[in-house]
Image (tube, rainbow, N blue to C red):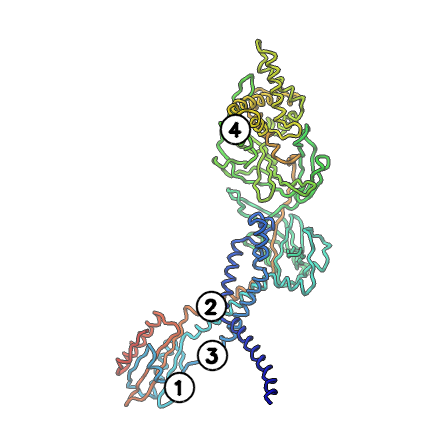
Amino acid sequence: MSASNSALGEPRLEHRKSQSMLANWMELLGSMRFAISLLTLICVASAIGTMVRQNEPWVNYVNQFGPFWAGFFQSLGLFKIYNAPWFIAVMAFLVTSTSLCVWRNAPKMIREMRVYRENIREGSLNAFAHRWQGTFSQSPGTLPDTITEWLKFKGYRVRLSKRDGGTMVAAKAGSLNRLGYVFTHVAIIVICIGGLLDSGVPLKVAIWALDKKPVQGGFISNQIPQESRLGVSNPSYRANLLLPEGQSSRVAVLNTDNGLLIQDLPFSLTLKKFRIDFYSTGMPRLFASDVEVFDPERNKRFDATIEVNKPLVYRGVTIYQSSFDDGGTQVKLNAIPLSGTGTTAGSLNGVIGDTLPLKGFDDRYSLELTGFKSINVESMPVNNSDKEASAKDGGNPAPVALSDDMKAFEKNLASVVGPGVKRDQKNRFTNIGPSVTYKLRDKAGQAKEFKTYMLPVSLDGAQYYLAGMRDTPADNFQYLRIPVDEDGQITGFMRLRAALQDPALRRQAAERFAAQAFGQKGDSPDLRAKVADSASKALDRFAGVDGQPGGLAAIASFIDKTVPEKDRETAGSVLIRLIQGSMWELYQISREKAGLPDVAANAFEGRFVQDAQLGLSDIAFFGAPVLLEMDQFNEVKASVFQVAKAPGQWVVYAGCLLLVIGVFSMFYIRERRLFFWVTPEGQGSKVWMGMSTTRKTMDFENEYQRIVKELDERADGVDEGKSGGKQE
């Protein structure tokens, strides 16, 4: 018998343990501490989502945090935190925890709201901190009715209970205060459910349930298979739509972790015109899209304007003006070689977004047209006086002044490839015209990004074409200044560059410089020949011979290696004079070869040659075989829309309304209860009164004092020892 009992007892014990474990889990899920912990975690995650920009390109995070931390943060889902699995799990647990709390406590609170507690005893009234006791001449049969009318006048709900030779008058007011707790908890549930509806959960469920497969790559066409498309009945999504002017679309693009999905829209959207306006600071003041909406199902067509913070809502779909982009602007570029003796290599025609081979120019690279801007508002210097260049030594321009320290001298030589604007000057915002951005990618896949402006820019009293270069998108553009000639073109600079690459012309320019400087009577022919030879070698080193980099930095490096430190400043001054004088003659020779007359040594031409030397020196840092100058363009603008269907939005609004009602109910509705025990006392009645509240405040104290005062005025006698209780 004992063995049988033992065998039967073990399963029962295990069942009790499992029940106990389930009860413990339910207790944990429904506890206030667990819910507060989840709320704290959500608040921390939301703060991170506010500080860290969400859904940015991966390269932006790598540039900001570095490869290691970017990968670590990505594994935690911090770059898409509101769609991260752990964040959604926390939201789901919070819904579960709060729901359990409401399920367990809401019925109790509702029952408590309906209870008057009319069965309370006289002894309990004596224990109240706020109590009163007195006598009335009115009989016990009519006094409870009088008290009832008086309490109803004050806004109380009253119930009478006759028992044990007396009458209990139980009254209550502000019971809706308890609904505040219920509404607040329900609001948290509703808001979380709304957030889950607008998160990535419905999309992931749709992908799983309908077996959708994202497509790879960024090219979208009409041949997208049905398995990669989501129908118009999709209840929740947030997609993007890039729409060029004059084009229509009935689909938007959803970005997922594994590729792209196409979201069909219940209407087609046509961008008729995109409008943009700027503040004086160069920041966009307004960008708006004039669109046409066509609903084929309802055969409805209408025009609308979409602006920032003024979306268009139609058939449950909200269209936001997100940003703007290029819609396929056609550009014509002049390809100018930066190596060899050529001055122009022809032209290229393309559309922004295209990838073109550089056939006929440089087969080692391919051209990627990445961006176009018709308006570039930049902070430009004003009130710059021209730096007059004096002419001496037979019309040669003044030499470049050297610093005392050769390292500082070398740094100054390379300072031209840098920011296009000096920030230590008085600036104003100026539109400097259209620009094109492109990349040159080599066979190994490495690319450098370039930016050139269509029009010359006024800087430091002269005009230059600016050509920017950077190695990565995280870097700032470093600009090469190319001075313009008397016709406002870069033709003169390119002629001088081509002449510098010709050894025969370099030798001829050196000899002409020597003849002009030392060709007077009494000058030694040997001296003239030595000067010509030295000037020729200096030009050769400046031009870069035998595959070696040239420029003024090469001159500085040569001086550092071959000249003693005490003689470097003198040697540098001599070499710079030789190069400057020879470059002036080389400039005249380049004009002669082009059939142009010689120019006089004036301030404009002298500065042009000086600026050209700096530009030619810095071409070595530019890192490109050709310079692409924009000649013509046909701009096509595009709007970037965010298309959203968010059923959870109204759910969240309803939750917020419940939250407001709940909070106001808890803080501004005060639950008060009054109890009057009426018994016979001679020819009249004796009354015991007690008053209580769930939250003792100054208003409650004042109300209690008013009630006691009125009772004192109406009573025939007051028991001073048991009246006027104060809050403990």
In the rendered image, the vertical position of residue 65 relative to residue 572, given as above or below: below
Which residue lies under the disc numbered 1? 161
Q: Secondary structure at mark 4?
A: helix
**Which label lies toward us, 2 or 4?**
4
Amino acid type, residue under disc 2 in the picture: Ile
Q: Residue 100 location, x and y as percent?
A: 53, 73
Left or right of residue 402, residue 639 in this image: right
Q: Residues within 10 Å of mark 4 (few under 14, many from 20)?
A: some
- Residue 679 visible in the current orientation: yes
Q: What amino acid does circle 4 point to?
A: Met
Q: Amino acid at mark 1?
A: Ser
Disc 2 to disc 3, how far (Cα)? 20 Å
Specify whether 728 is left or right of 246.
left
**Alpha-carbon distance for marks 4 and 3?**
91 Å
Check contact, mark 2 vs mark 4: CB within 8 A.
no
- From the viewer's side, name the closer residue of 71 and 508: 71
Q: Which mark is residue 111?
A: 3
| Residue holding disc 2 | 661
Q: CA distance from mark 2 to mark 4?
A: 76 Å
Mark 1 and mark 2 lie on one chain; the one further toward the N terminus is 1
The residue indicated by pointer 4 is 406
Q: Residue shown at 67%/64% (left/top)?
A: 208
Q: Which mark lies nearer to you, 3 or 1? A: 3
* Vertical placement of residue 359 versus 94, above or below: above
- Going from N to C along the chain, the mark reached first, 2 or 3, is 3
For residue 305, say whether it is visible.
Answer: no
Closer to the N terminus: mark 4 or mark 3?
Answer: 3
x, y percentage for residue 289?
Answer: 60, 50
Q: For the residues carrying marks 2 and 3, which lies nearer the camera in this image?
A: 3
* 258 versus 149 height, above or below: above
Structural crowding at the residue carrying mark 1, measured as other residues with C-alpha within 10 Å and reported as few (<14), some (14–19) or many (≥20): some
Question: In the image, what residue type sits under mark 3?
Answer: Arg
